[in-house]
Amino acid sequence: MKNYPIWLLTLYLLLSCQPLIKEVQTAPLGVTAKNAMVVSAREEASKIGVAVMAQGGNAFDAMFATELALAVTFPYAGNLGGGGFMVYRLNNGTTGSLDYREMAPLAAEQDMYLDDMGQHDRKLSTLGAMAIGVPGTVKGIFEAHTQFGKLPVDQLIDPVIDLARNGYVVTAKQEERLNQYRDLIRETSGQQVLYAQTYKAGDTVKNPALASTLVRLREEGANAFYNGSMAEQMSQFIQTKGGIIKKEDFEQYRAYWRRPIRFSYQDLDIISMGPPSSGGLCLGQIMGMIAPYDLESLGHNTAAYVQHLTEAERRAYADRSHYLGDPDFVAIPTAQLLDSAYLRHRMSTFSPTKATESANMGYGEINFIESDETTHYSIVDPMGNAVSVTTTINGAYGSKLFDPELGFFYNNEMDDFSAKPGSPNMFGLIGGQANAIAPKKRMLSSMTPTIVERNGELWQVLGTPGGSTIITSVLQVILNTHHFKMTMQQAVNQPRFHHQWLPDLIQFEQEGFSEALMNSLKNQGHGIYQGEGRVIGKVDAIMRHSDGILEAGADPRGDDTAVGF
Ligand code: DON
C-alpha cells in the first residue's frame, strides 16, 4: 500500500465499503495494520479518521475528524451537544489529558432536582432541557487541534460535512435502538425532528441542519459555538424548552489540560483520566488492591478470580462515592487513595471465600439499563502518537432533546451529579457532597480513556462506554492481555462482570458465565445480577505488538469497526 500515491489511498479509504485490512471476528487476531489505526463505534468515523492520517495528519487531526463523524453517524452517543475526555501519549513518551466535560449552568442549584417532598425527580435530571450540562465537545476538539494538530480545519471537517449532507446508512443495531427510544424522543422533541421519524436498516439519514452547523464551525471555529450567534441560538432554544442555560454559560465554558493519573502495575505503566473523571483513580485503586495476588494461578473468570476483582472493585467504588468530584471544587486525596499501604489496608478485611458486605445502607431501586450510550475511540498515528478518547451525551440520545436547527441532541449529563446524598443516579451510583451540584462545577464521571505502556513503550490504547461499568471493563481487558496473554481482539471479546459497592451485587453479562460459577459465588454470599441481553461495555482498543504491528480490538457487542493502513 505504501507505494500508492496518498490521494489514491485516501480515495480508496473514503469510497471503499470495507476496511483496508478486513476484520476477522472469529480469528484470535483483530484487524492489523502497520502504520496507523482508528477503532470507533462506526465504520464511517474510523475511515474518516484514518484518511486524515493517510493525508499526513496526526492522531489529534484524526481525533477532530473522528469525533465529528461520530456526531453525524452515531447520534446515540456521538455528539456536539455533550462532552468528553482525551488522554494522549506523544511518540517521545510525553503524556497528558484534556478535560472537555460538561459543566453545570451558572443558574444551577444543589437541590434543583428535588421535588416538593425533597425527593429526587429522576425525570427532571434525565429528560429534556433541565438535564443539560453546558456542552464541551466543540471546545475540546478545537483545543486539541490548536495544541497538536497539523492539518487545517477545512481539510478535517469537509469530509464530515459531506457525510452529514449525503447521509449515512442505518445499521440493524441502530434501527433497534431508534425504535427503543423513539417515543421518548417524540415526547421530548416533538414528532417532526429528524430522529422522531422511523428508520429501517439500510435507510440513509441525511442531516442538512448538522451540515450547516459544521460549516459554521469551519468558518468561525469554536467561537461560533461559545461566543457567537450559535450560543445565542442554543440558549434561546434550551430556555424555550424549560432549561436554564444562558449565553453566558457558553461564554464561560473552558476545556482544561490536566495531569493524567499515572500508576504502575508490574511491568506496566498505566496512564488514565483523572478527576473530574473517577476512571483513572478507581482503576489505579483496583489494580493496586489486586497486585499482591497471583491472578494467573486463579484462572481466567473462575469464581476465585471474580471474587478477587469484585472485592477490590467494591472498595474502590466506595471510596469513589465519598471522595471524588470536580477537583476545582473539592480537595481530592489522590496520592493517599493510590498509596500501596492504604490499598493493602483496604484489603485487610478481604476473604478469598466470602463476600464482604457493602456498607450497612440499603441499595436504591435501580433499573439496570443496557448501558453503552457513551462512545470511545482509540487512535495511533504513523508517527507513533496515541490518542484515547471517551465522549458522551450520557444516556441514549442524551436528554432526548434534539435541536432541529442545529441538528444534534443535547446531553443529560446533569444526572451524573449526586442530586441528593444516597440517591442513585441512572447507573445506580451513589455520591455525596463531593459530587453535589454547584454552578460551573463538573459532574463526576466514570469515563476511563487509557493508555498502557509496557517496559516504557506504548502497548495499548483503550476505553469504553458503559457508565459505572467503564472502569471495570477497562480493567478486565488489560488483565486479559497482561495475565492471560490474549490478543487485543480476544481480550475485548471475553465476557465481563462488574461490582460497584452499591448495589451490593455482581453484575454479569448474559453470555459466557456458567450456572456453576454463579452458584459458587452465591454460596460465598454474593448477590448476583444477570439481566437478559445484558452487555457490559463496548471496548475499542489498539495493541502494539512487539514487532510494531498494530492490532485492533473492536467490540463485537456493537457496530464497532477498526480501519488501518
Ligand atoms: O461520565 C460518565 O461516567 C457517564 N456519563 C458515562 C455514560 C455512559 O457511559 C453511557 N453509557 N452507559
Image (cartoon, rainbow, N blue to C red):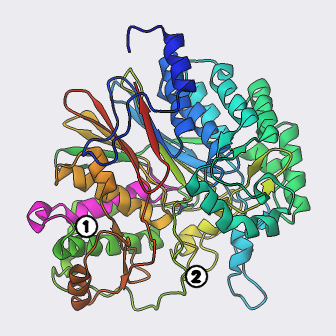
State the image coordinates of residue 82 (x, y, percent, origin top left): 66, 51
Relative height, residue 80 to residue 429 (above, below): above
Query: Which mark, by number, is residue 343?
Result: 1
**Other-residue count near label 2 (Cα within 10 Å), few / some / many at <14 / 14–19 / ≥20:** some
Whether the residue carrying mark 2 lies under 8 Å from ligand 1 is answered with no
Query: Which mark, by number, is residue 423?
Result: 2
Amino acid tagged 1 = Leu
Residue 485 or residue 27, whichever sits in front: 27
- Residue drawn at (52%, 12%) of the image: 8
Q: Secondary structure at mark 2?
A: loop
Q: Is residue 98 magenta?
A: no
Region rendered in magenta: 273-300
Q: In which quadrant is the N terminus drawn?
A: top left
On the picture, is 175 further left or further right than 7?
A: right
Amino acid tagged 2 = Ser
Q: Is residue 296 magenta?
A: yes
* Location of ligand 1 given as a quarter of the image: bottom right
In the figure, residue 522 lies in which quadrant? bottom left
Relative height, residue 273 to residue 325 (above, below): above
